[in-house]
């Protein structure tokens, strides 16, 4: 049996291939468990093509252990980003003033829990407790 390749058959074949690739890639994506702690995104930006920057706010009662658990979860969530900068704070006003040079460092560090930095190109990666 000879199959005649028409434009319609070719288009159907391409659509079938693309659909099967899409279905397979969806099945292969890891299911991330829920965040271990509630957080609010105060600021989000995308440095470079594949970077992610976030200023996050968590509850004032958040413990060091809870903050590090959230940090590990966030690193998993954004593992496909080549560059990652995440600041976790306990106060919305401090988060909004994170980049404000007129905002007191003393006040910022009362609420600044964790800094996550990762640069896949340089190999640098750190998760640092910042609260003083």
Image (spheres, grey):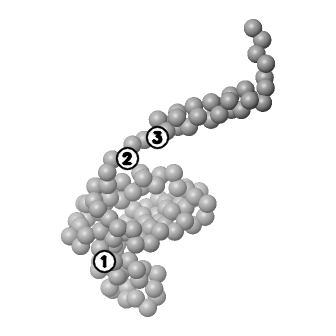
Q: Is residue 129 visible?
A: no
Residue extending furthest toward the front? 8
Quadrant for the N terminus in the image = top right
Q: Please provide percent x and percent y for residue 98.
A: 42, 80
> For the residue carrying disc 3, how many other residues have a C-alpha within 10 Å: few (<14), some (14-19), or many (20+)?
few
- The quarter of the displayed image where residue 18 is located: top right
Check disc 2 and report the residue beneath it.
32
Q: Please provide percent x and percent y for residue 115.
A: 40, 68
Image side of residue 13 versus residue 50, left or right:
right
Image side of residue 25 versus residue 113, left or right:
right
Residue extending furthest toward the left? 61
Check disc 3 and report the residue beneath it.
29
- Dot 3 falls on a residue whose secondary structure is loop
Residue toward you, 109 or 3: 3
- Dot 1 falls on a residue whose secondary structure is loop
- Dot 2 falls on a residue whose secondary structure is loop
Q: CA distance from mark 1 to mark 2?
A: 27 Å
Q: Please provide percent x and percent y for residue 43.
A: 44, 72
Image side of residue 17 versus residue 90, left or right:
right
Q: CA distance from mark 3 to mark 2?
A: 9 Å
| Residue found 46% across the figure and 40% down from its top | 29
Say whether disc 1 or disc 3 marks the residue closer to the N-terminus: 3
| Residue found 55% across the figure and 61% down from its top | 51
| Residue found 58% across the figure and 34% down from its top | 19
Check disc 1 and report the residue beneath it.
91
């Amino acid at each position: 049996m000879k199959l005649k390749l028409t434009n319609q058959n070719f288009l159907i074949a391409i659509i079938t291939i693309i659909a099967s690739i899409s279905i397979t890639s969806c099945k292969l994506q890891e299911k991330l468990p829920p965040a271990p702690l509630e957080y609010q995104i105060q600021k989000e930006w995308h440095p470079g093509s594949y970077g992610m920057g976030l200023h996050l706010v968590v509850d004032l009662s958040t413990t060091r252990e809870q903050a590090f658990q959230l940090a590990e979860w966030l690193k998993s969530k954004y593992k496909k980003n080549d560059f990652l900068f995440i600041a976790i704070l306990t106060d919305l006003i401090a988060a909004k003033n994170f980049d404000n040079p007129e905002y007191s460092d003393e006040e910022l560090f009362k609420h600044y829990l964790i800094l996550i930095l990762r640069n896949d190109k340089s190999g640098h990666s750190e998760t640092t407790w910042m609260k003083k």
